[in-house]
Image (cartoon, rainbow, N blue to C red):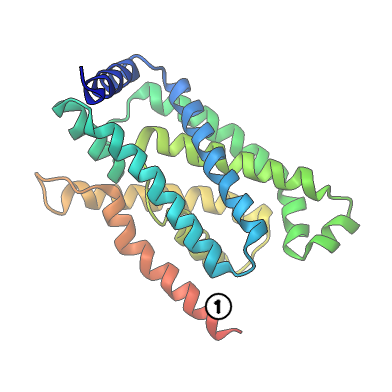
Amino acid sequence: MSPYYYQRHICTIFLQYLHSVSSYALVIAAFAGSLIATGFILIFSRKMQHMATLLVAGIMIGYICSAITDFVVTFAEDSDIVNLHGWSQGSFSGMTWTNITIAGVIVGVSMVAAFLLSKPIGAYQLGEAYAQSLGVNIKVFRVVLILLSSILSACVTAFAGPISFVGMAVPHLVKQGLGTSKPVVVIPGIFLGGAVFCMMCDLIARTAFAPLELNISTVTSIFGAPVVIAMLLKRQKGR
């Protein structure tokens, strides 16, 4: 038999096995994938001096991950392809109360941990030297931040798929709205603002062209991309 037959057979078994995977296993798998992608970006950051080059490298890593996903989807059944395509575009439609409970626990614990780090984060905003003078262990602090951001992004991506521009647009809007960058104020505001932003985008996605339902990532991109572009232009003018 041809190698293609074995590839298809293995990928089919893999996809069928995913149906029996628990929600915690999905989060752990997404967390591992997030750490791997972040690890590659950190490796590239040591070799690249310009932020634009690092941004391009990050985009290329995203394309590689998308290619791997498309490769797996190629060998899936038709019903699985529809579900995986919807997940890849971002959607809350497949959420269950079990998923919500697990996501609530993980996000709640991570939020408390991030809130407890508000003082070191505030010191780090003023520079590494200032943070070190206050007793912040920079290496440990960086690792904790990477782990927290990875577990939060993994929890969302595992259940709802990749939702674009929320992590970039919402923090900027919250800081502008609150008029401060103090982490003790901004962190709870970002969690609340992100939830409200996604809820409104999900409402638009479900009702704008009803009975057709848009992918939530489409709506978040429409509203979030202009905010990110404006933020970059403002930063460029400030130089």
Near-viewer residue (56 or 5)? 5
Residue 47: quarter of image = bottom right
Q: Quadrant of the N terminus?
A: top left
Question: Which residue has dot 1 on it?
Answer: 235
Near-viewer residue (194 or 135)? 135
Q: Quadrant of the C terminus?
A: bottom right
Near-viewer residue (5 or 130)? 5
The residue that appears at 83% across and 47% down in the rendered structure is 137
Is residue 109 found left or right of 29 in the rendered image? right
The residue that appears at 40% across and 43% down in the rendered structure is 65
Does 225 appear above or below 142?
A: below
Q: Amino acid at mark 1?
A: Arg
> Residue 145's x, y, as percent?
66, 45
- Pointer 1 local density, CA inside 10 Å: few below 14, some 14–19, many at least 20: few
* Circle 1 SS class: helix
Q: Is residue 92 visible from the viewing direction of this image?
A: no
Does 17 appear above or below 140?
A: above
Tell how many labels. Answer: 1
> Residue 86's x, y, as percent?
24, 39
Does 78 appear above or below 10?
A: below
Is residue 186 found left or right of 205 in the rendered image? right
Residue 22: quarter of image = top left
Q: Is residue 50 visible from the viewing direction of this image?
A: yes
Does 124 appear above or below 237?
A: above
